[in-house]
Image: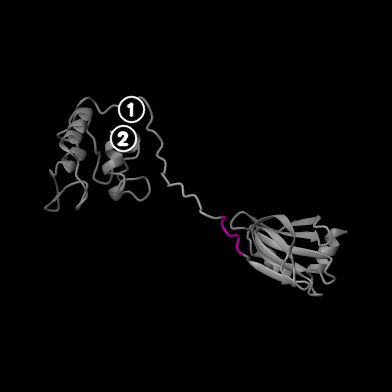
Amino acid sequence: MDAIFSRHCLDCHASQDPEHGLVLENYEALMKGGETGPAIVAEKSDESLLIQMVEGRFEKEGKIKVMPPGKRKKLAPEEIAALRAWIDAGAKEPITPPIARELSVPRIVPKATPRNPVNALACSANARLVAAGRYGQVQLQDAKDFRLIRTLSGPKGNVNTVLFSPNDSEVFAAGGEPAIGGEVRQWRVADGELLHTFPVTKTPFMPWLFLRMPQSWLLAAMIRK
């Protein structure tokens, strides 16, 4: 029965926003019925609302109701016969639980290495270095020819802001993942050593505000000590 319901019914009668309150995703919900009443009368398929609807024998407000509605494919005679036989046999609960439904998504292999776009840029005070913030990393590049000097890995999510310290000895990066958390990371420019990680609330935008605060360098210095 589960295969028939999956094929014809769950577009309208899944647990999320079901039509007329009738859910056909599991046995308990099916036997409970919906707004019109029980959908199944055990051992009496002729009296069962479900059979009346799929056969087009249910009338409401002077109109015949047929399920599935509109131009959707109707149940085949053998499918209706299977439903009738199951109901007339007592509409018993399946011995084995239904197999969990999985979304089938095609596997698409990229033809080239996916790009990791730049989300933030900063230039050192002496104009010798450029810091490029990307997803999960910050790249330090030569400001003249953009030659890669080193990659600073580890930031969570998108790096939204990068900033050099006033003396260019350190670089800060702020980023995060929506609804998970944000952080500010501090590295030494000379060797790329990670000096500190500052967790900042559950929004990726708060680290950006942290770095834009005039007192941020003083706060970082206090924490470093």
Residue at 66% over, 68% down: 120
Against 3, residue 138 (above or below) is below
- Please state which amino acid type lies under the numbered disc 2: Asp
Q: Which residues are magenta?
A: 113-117
Is the C-beta separation of discs 2 and 1 under 8 Å?
yes
Query: With 101 as the anchor, is 40 left or right in this view?
Result: left
* Location of the N terminus (image quadrant): top left
> Helix, strand or loop at disc 1?
loop
Q: Residue 80: image x %, image y %?
A: 18, 35
First in residue order: circle 2 vs circle 1: 2
According to the picture, the residue beneath numbered tag 1 turns out to be 94
The residue wearing badge 2 is 2
Q: Residue at x 46, y 50 (%)?
A: 108
Q: Position of residue 96 (x, y in %)?
A: 37, 26
* Image position of 164 with respect to 63: above or below: below
Residue 33, can we see it?
no
Residue shown at the point (58%, 60%) measured from the top left: 115
Q: Is residue 29 left or right of residue 136?
A: left
| Residue 15 sits inside the magenta stretch | no
Q: How many marks?
A: 2
Residue 155 drawn at (x, y percent): 69, 56
Residue 191 location, quadrant: bottom right
How crowded pointer 1 is (Cα within 10 Å; few <14, some 14-19, many 20+) is rated as few
**Above or below for 74 versus 174:** above
Magenta-drawn stretch, dominant element (helix, strand or loop)? loop
- Circle 1: residue type: Pro
Residue 213 image point, x, y percent: 74, 71
